[in-house]
Amino acid sequence: MGWFIAPDYWLSRLVFQRALAAVYLVAFLTAALQFRALLGERGMLPIPRFVERVPFRRAPSLFHWRYSDALFAAVAWAGCAVSAALLAGLDSWLPLWGGMLLWLVPWALYLSIVNVGQTWYGFGWESLLLETGFLAVFLGNDEVAPPIVVLFLLRWILFRVEFGAGLIKLRGDECWRKLTCLDYHHETQPMPGPLSWFFHHLPAPLHRAEVAANHVTQLLVPFLLFTPQPVATAGASLMILTQLWLVLSGNFAWLNWITIVLALSAVQWPGRAPASVPAAPLWYEVVVLAVAVLVVALSYRPVVNMISRSQVMNRSFDPLHLVNTYGAFGSISRVRYEVVVEGTLDDGPPEDAEWREYEFRGKPGDPRHWPRQFAPYHLRLDWLMWFVALSPAYAGAWFGALVERLLENDRDTLRLLRHSPFPRDRPPLYVRARLFRYRYTSWRELRETGACWERTYVREFLPPVRLVEAAERP
């Protein structure tokens, strides 16, 4: 069928596939380096407990069959290896069916991780990677020209990501309608980057222009994706530029990068397929069209949610994360709070003890410590600490477990931190947490003190606890 293929997107497919493989690699590397403290057998939210109470049909994962830290490590590092192979172009050297199976491997492995990841994997970009990765299975390799159906399904994902985010903003916080949200956002976002301080101090009129441009990019430009070229390429390019602006202004894991990857698939790069490319085999056309029908059918609930006045962000409607709903920052915090965790070796009254502060890798702590760039790498503990500062309800069971691990000087937990103030052989006797209000310093304060943050004590978040008390907490 001549209408089935789009030879002009030969290079677009290649760029998309290699970029997606790079995002997969980061995601699996993040899982491999952090899982023991978060989800392992002695983790804060152990996977074995989760699979005991959640059936396979609700959260399909190979870890329902068996779990061990060694098996999780094998899955994560295997995902890294397959992603690296795809990044190097191994799928192009295989027959069509072999390339499809190779792309299916990282999707199945990462699905197994996400579905048992619990709170640590409750972010929209996890489902976005899975949905995008599933469609990548059917995009083909050098044996066939790109199927236009799959290319449009990728644009359908991008449309829902951008348009859904635009709608949630207009329906949410009034500062989006007043164009004032960026007066606060760069200071209160989950994890500021090295340039966030400077973005915060941009003139107010430029902040208004940023918000207005964001509305245009998310509410109007997505419709250009379904127009003829070169208009579709222009629309996708505007989205890429907007996402790069967000990359510079904060640390949003791979959310911006996977959005850029999707936009790359809509860009018509110069270059055509080799003249000798054979027609797509019938079985491949049947499979692709069947997947398209499935995606259209599963899109019903996400679309209903997107156009609903009670729209929710970042939700999966099926356990395989095939078609999801997205959105971000429907409301903006005006004030930044941070939970500062401290420990002491003293056994006397807390008010007389010498308290030493734990330093996290990404979240603000020491006011003189300038934020670093971590994205697309995802610091999961740091992100959850931001949510806890918004409300203690986000702490759940894992925060008490974190305190317990700190009291034990647990090696895997300490590896998630930038610095522990205690030697390996002398864990703290007590750990406590306090809530502080943080604000960016002014230009004058930065020159005088060298600190990018100024913080003020608000209240006690967790009173001093010993190891036995920490273990008894929920």
Image (spheres, grey):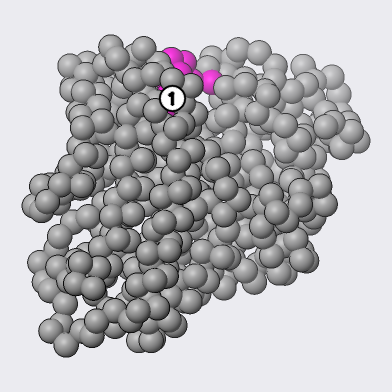
Residue 441 position, x and y percent, is 37, 20
Q: Position of residue 364 (x, y in %)?
A: 50, 32
- Residue position marked by numbered label 1 in the rendering: 308
Vertical side of 228 occupied by 403: above or below: above
Quadrant assignment for the N terminus: bottom left
Instruction: Please tell me whether residue 349 is drawn above or below residue 328 in the rendered image.
Output: above
Residue 17 image point, x, y percent: 33, 67
Give the amino acid type for the residue marked by disc 1 in the picture.
Ser
**Front position in the image: 151 or 45:** 151
State the residue at coordinates (69%, 65%): 62
**Start-end of magenta stretch:** 329-337
Nearest the camera: 452 or 218?
Answer: 218
Question: Residue at position x 37%, y 82% from top?
Answer: 96
Side of 227 where 356 appears, left or right: right
In the rendered view, would you say 163 is above or below 97? above
Rate crowding at label 1 as few (under 14), some (14 to 19) or many (20 or more) other CA atoms within 10 Å.
few
Which residue sits at x=46%, y=56%?
A: 294
Question: Is residue 139 found left or right of 387 in the rendered image?
Answer: left
Counting from the top left corner in percent of width and height, residue 280 is at 29, 79
